[in-house]
Image: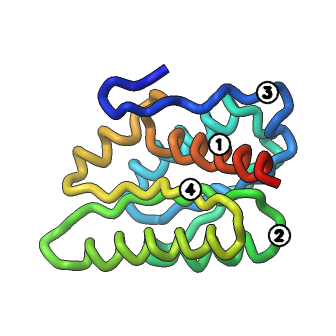
Amino acid sequence: MSDVKSGFVAPAAPEPGEFAATRVAVLSTRWNVEVIDALRGGAHRALSDWGVGSGHVTEFRAPGAYELPLAAHALLHGGRFDAVIALGAVIRGDTPHFEYVAGECARGLMDVQLKFNKPVAFGVLTVNTPQQATERCGPGQDNKGYEAVSAALDMIRLIRSAS
């Protein structure tokens, strides 16, 4: 089924038990708490929908988006997790701070997933206004936390099938 707005084709539904033993770290920032809590809610709904056992999900907090790559690196380096779901919200302000933080966060998270060959989902909102952040963390499946989990689990499936 395709989403007309974006052309997105949803991944196949998980097989029973497919992700029951998958170990996931949900890593979120301490900034923009209401937005982050809504993203975390979406992430946990997706984990449940995909059949990840609640005992296999661990929550972590990083100070901000700039620190997410190092935190994700530490979590995957230990070998305990199959994926990291990085959640944050960088909202544009009046200074170039946005470009530095958002860009380095994205690059750093990409570097971590390539180093460990494990998904690091980019659930970090990079928006111009608080309203745009709120629109991206609603209760449905278009919640970016939900989408980040779905992408990570779909990548685990792909990596497993390539082995």
Q: Say which label, 3 or 2, has the lower sequence index.
A: 3
Marks 3 and 1 sit apart, C-alpha to C-alpha, by 12 Å
Neighbourhood count class around disc 4 (C-alpha, 10 Å): few under 14, some 14–19, many 20 upward: many
Residue bearing mark 3 = 15
Q: Quadrant of the C terminus?
A: bottom right
Marks 3 and 2 sit apart, C-alpha to C-alpha, by 25 Å
Neighbourhood count class around disc 2 (C-alpha, 10 Å): few under 14, some 14–19, many 20 upward: few
Is residue 56 rendered to the left or right of residue 133?
right
Please, what is the three-letter code of the amino acid marked with disc 1?
Asp
Q: Say which label, 4 or 2, has the lower sequence index.
A: 2
Q: Residue at x 80, y 39 (%)?
A: 19
Residue bearing mark 1 = 154
Q: Residue furthest left?
A: 94
Residue bearing mark 4 = 121
How far across and down, in percent of the image, does residue 90 sit? 33, 63
Do tag 2 and tag 1 residues touch (Cβ < 8 Å)? Answer: no
In the rendered image, the vertical position of residue 135 relative to residue 80, given as above or below:
above
How far across and down, in percent of the image, does residue 83 sit? 70, 57
Marks 3 and 4 sit apart, C-alpha to C-alpha, by 21 Å
Nearest to the observer: residue 96 or residue 41: 96
Do tag 3 and tag 2 residues touch (Cβ < 8 Å)? Answer: no
Please, what is the three-letter code of the amino acid marked with disc 2?
Gly
Q: Residue at x 53, y 69 (%)?
A: 110
Residue 79 disc label: 2
Determine the secondary structure under disc 3: loop
Q: Say which label, 2 or 1, has the lower sequence index.
A: 2
